[in-house]
Every structure is written in structure tokens, then in C-alpha cells.
Amino acid sequence: QKEVEQNSGPLSVPEGAIASLNCTYSDRGSQSFFWYRQYSGKSPELIMSIYSNGDKEDGRFTAQLNKASQYVSLLIRDSQPSDSATYLCAVKGYYGQNFVFGPGTRLSVLP
Amino acid sequence: EAQVTQNPRYLITVTGKKLTVTCSQNMNHEYMSWYRQDPGLGLRQIYYSMNVEVTDKGDVPEGYKVSRKEKRNFPLILESPSPNQTSLYFCASSPPGGGNYRGEQYFGPGTRLTVT
């Protein structure tokens, strides 16, 4: 059974700080990694994808992937109260067509 | 407006009474999927479909059926619902050209199902 683990939180950071969200996965064959954001009562929305080791930056978001350690992270710089949401890590294998999501980390950015 | 729609949005039913949750997308997406979301467990994939008449099981398919007779529709069928199927259900679709490989899933608004 493929597993994706995240700290459930809540993770609280002050406005303007860097929020660091972590995710580990069990399937070494996983090839594609994603971060979704889900506001309370809303649907998930894709914010970052990463496929190779290293860092990928998009605006205030940076995804980091370390396949050897089976570890994915998301950094949110200059955190804003509007970033308060649950962040879901998702993993997809190379041959499989299904996605496995982690339980999500709830982030609270305090004004 | 490009969107994924689900109906109904809320449903309360009794054990054993067959129900169908509809999902429709107007974006000509080939890949469609159903998830359930439970507290502490995150999103778990029930079934997915790569195209018309092509469906496959996700991680938690027991107690569910799907069909894909048209590209735009992907209904989820619970033939004999039980209380452990009480959950929040999401339908999602991905654009062609490998969208599902890139993780670009567009989610519907969700259906909250309660089985008593």
C-alpha cells in the first residue's frame, strides 16, 4: 500500500514568515509530486508540481524534492493570512494512473 | 465557464438505498476521477477513467461502481450504501496531452453524503 505522510498540524506562522510543509512517501517508484491547497469547505487546487530532484520556484512558493530520502517539501515565503488553508501532498507513480494524497497539513498564518 | 459539476451537493440517505452522484465536465478532458475525503485520511482515489469505456480501480473501490459512456460524464454509483460510506466526495478531471501526468486535476465542488 503506497503511503504519503504529512504532519497534520496545525502549523502556525506569523504574517511575513516562511512556512515549511513536509511530506514523505513510501513508494520509491513515484515519479511525480504535487502540492494542492484546499480552503475550508472548498475543492483542492493545484499550486505546485515537481518531477526531479532539487528546487522549483513559482512566486512565493518553492517545492523541494529529494527522491533518495523520499521527501518533498513546500516553502511559502512572505506568508499571508490568505495562505491559511490545508495543504495536500500528492504522489503519482510512473506507470500507474492513480494519485495518492497525504492527509494534509493545516496552515494558519497569523496577522 | 470551464468547470466540473457534481450533483447533488448534499445527500442524506438510508442504508441500502441505491444512489448515483453525477459528475460532468465541459472541458473535453479525457481523464476523470472520483475521490472521497475523510478527516485525518485525506483524499483517497476510488475510481478513475482514462477515456470513454476505460475505467480502473483506485485505492478504495469497494462498494462503488462507475461508468464512462460519454466523455463528459462520470457518475459514481453506490448500489447499497452503508454508514462507512458517509464522506465528502470529489470528482476531478484532467486536460488531454498528459494533464493527468502533470497532476493538473480540476476538482468539482464536492458532494457531502450521509448514510444513516
Image: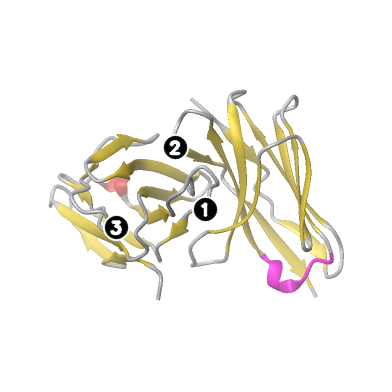
In front: B92, or B99?
B99
Position of A20 relative to A70 (above/below):
below
In front: B10, or B107?
B107
Could you tell me the amino acid type at mark 1?
Glu
Magenta stretch encompasses residue B47? no
Disc 3 is placed on an element classified as: strand
Position of B15 relative to A39 (above/below):
above
What's the chain of the residue with tag 3?
Answer: B
Q: Position of residue A34 (x, y in %)?
A: 61, 46
Residue A107 is drawn in which quadrant? bottom right
Q: Residue furthest left?
A: B17
How far apart, in angstroms, are the residues tagged by discs 2 and 1? 13 Å
Q: Quadrant of the C terminus of chain A?
A: bottom right
Q: Which residue is mark 1?
A: B104
Region rendered in magenta: A78-84
Disc 2 is placed on an element classified as: loop
Disc sitting over residue A98 in the figure: 2
Q: How is the image coloured?
A: secondary structure
Left or right of B32 in this view: A100: right
Q: Position of residue A25 (x, y in %)?
A: 63, 31
Left or right of A42 in this view: A35: right
Mark positioned earlier in the residue sequence (3 or 1): 1
How far apart, in angstroms, are the residues tagged by discs 3 and 2? 26 Å
Instruction: Name the residue located 52 percent from the left edge and 59 percent from the top edge.
Output: A44
Disc 1 packing (10 Å; few <14; some 14–19; many ≥20): many
